[in-house]
Image (tube, helix red, strand yellow):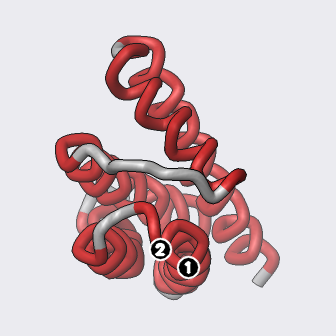
Amino acid sequence: MLRTTLAIITAFLSWFILWIGTEALLSKIWPAWFGAHQAAFTAAIKTGGAFTADTTILLIQIVLGTVVSLVAGFLAALIARKNKRAPLVLGVLLLAVGVLKAVMSWPFVPVWYHVIFTALLLPMAVVGGRLKSAGPR
């Protein structure tokens, strides 16, 4: 039980570290495009100001969320070893945070983004866990 709990917590925190780290890297690589978009989004969330989402960046974030969720699910399964529920619990936690993020950012990005991004969190964490289960032991 303790190992499973630690697996879920570690994978959950790893998801955020990977997400934030990748967004920071992309902002450094493309400061005038990706970085400016993220800064404008953050400012809009804080002040309620105007913001126009870039569709390409939203698609990148969907892909990023998918990959990071797969990695986190794999990590949860790796640490939990025999407990196959760890990626599922991780996915539920990610889904809860995803819904919270959607509520906070609802007026700033299109509905299709909220639906796709949030809907992929749980199943990708589970698939990531299954990738570990399918690999060498």
Quarter of the picture containing the C terminus is bottom left
Position of 54 with respect to 82 (left or right) is left
What x and y, as percent, mark residue 37?
41, 34
User: Which residue is depicted at the point 45% across and 26% down?
Assistant: 36
What type is the residue that disc 1 sits on?
Val
Q: Are marks 2 and 1 in contact (CB under 8 Å)?
A: yes
Q: Is residue 68 above or below residue 131?
A: above
Q: Nearer the viewer, residue 5 or 61?
A: 61
Position of 34 with respect to 116 (left or right) is right
Residue at disc 1, secondary structure: helix
On the question of residue 55 being in view, the answer is: yes
Q: Is disc 2 surrounded by few (<14), some (14 to 19) or many (20+) residues within 10 Å?
A: some
User: Which residue is depicted at the point 20% across and 49% down?
Assistant: 55
User: Which residue is depicted at the point 44% across and 49% down?
Assistant: 51
On the question of residue 83 being in view, the answer is: no
Quarter of the picture containing the N terminus is bottom right
What x and y, as percent, mark residue 101?
56, 70
Q: Nearer the viewer, residue 35 or 9?
A: 35
Residue at disc 2, secondary structure: helix
Q: Is residue 18 above or below residue 97?
A: above
Rounded to the nearest angstrom, the CA distance separating label 2 from label 1 is: 5 Å
- The residue furthest front is 50
Q: Nearer the viewer, residue 83 or 92?
A: 92
Q: Is residue 23 above or below residue 92?
A: above
Position of 53 with respect to 5 (left or right) is left
Q: Is residue 36 above or below residue 6?
A: above
What x and y, as percent, mark residue 100?
60, 78
The residue wearing badge 1 is 103
User: Which residue is depicted at the point 73% across and 71% down?
Assistant: 3
What type is the residue that disc 2 sits on?
Trp
What x and y, as percent, mark residue 135?
26, 59
Q: Which mark is residue 106?
A: 2
